[in-house]
Amino acid sequence: MRLLAPDEALPAGTLVLANDADLAQQSEALRDAPAVALAFPKFGDGRAFSQAVVLRGRWRYAGSIVATGEIIVDMLPLLRRCGFDAARLLPGQTAEAAERALGYFPLPQDPSHDRRPHA
């Protein structure tokens, strides 16, 4: 998973979507977007997880999916499992802590879009 610094720009051409955006209404924009940024406006609001699963599973979106907003490093393994391939860290979070969190679960506990074997 690619880790973006808090002030790092999103990739050029990124489509930024709110976590309550109707993906079906964005189908044309999604087709042309090399990346999609999905927002977590607060820690307890996980609708962007569902958006990522729909994008990867139902829509077969092959571009980059970036998590933005209130991302804590403990969320990174689940973000990766749901189809995100990048996340913007919050101020004060370190890449070292993020990499450590990504290593917490070497084998996924459930099946997912990535078809990796699970425990």
Image (cartoon, helix red, strand yellow):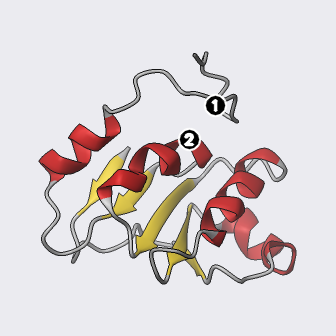
Q: Nearer the viewer, residue 74 or 34?
A: 74
* Residue at left offset 64%, top offset 79%: 19
Residue 73, position in %: x, y? 31, 55
Residue type at tag 1: Asp
Query: Left or right: where does residue 94 sit relative to residue 68?
Result: left
- The quarter of the rendered structure image containing the C terminus is top right
Q: Nearer the viewer, residue 22 or 110?
A: 110
Q: Nearer the viewer, residue 9 or 114?
A: 114
Q: Is 52 situated above or below 92?
A: above
The mark nearer the N terminus, 1 or 2, is: 2
* Residue at left offset 78%, top offset 77%: 26
Residue 75, position in %: x, y? 42, 54
Query: Left or right: where does residue 82 sit relative to residue 21?
Result: left
* Residue at left offset 17%, top offset 51%: 95
Residue 37, position in %: x, y? 52, 70
Residue type at tag 2: Arg
Residue 90, position in %: x, y? 25, 72
Mark 1: secondary structure: loop
Find residue 21 and report its image quarter.
Answer: bottom right
Mark 2: secondary structure: helix
* Residue at left offset 75%, top offset 63%: 31
User: Which residue, given by chain and number where applicable, does mark 2 sit on?
Assistant: 81
- Residue 40 bears which disc, if any? none
Q: Are marks 1 and 2 in contact (CB under 8 Å)?
A: yes
User: Which residue, given by chain and number where applicable, does mark 1 sit on?
Assistant: 114
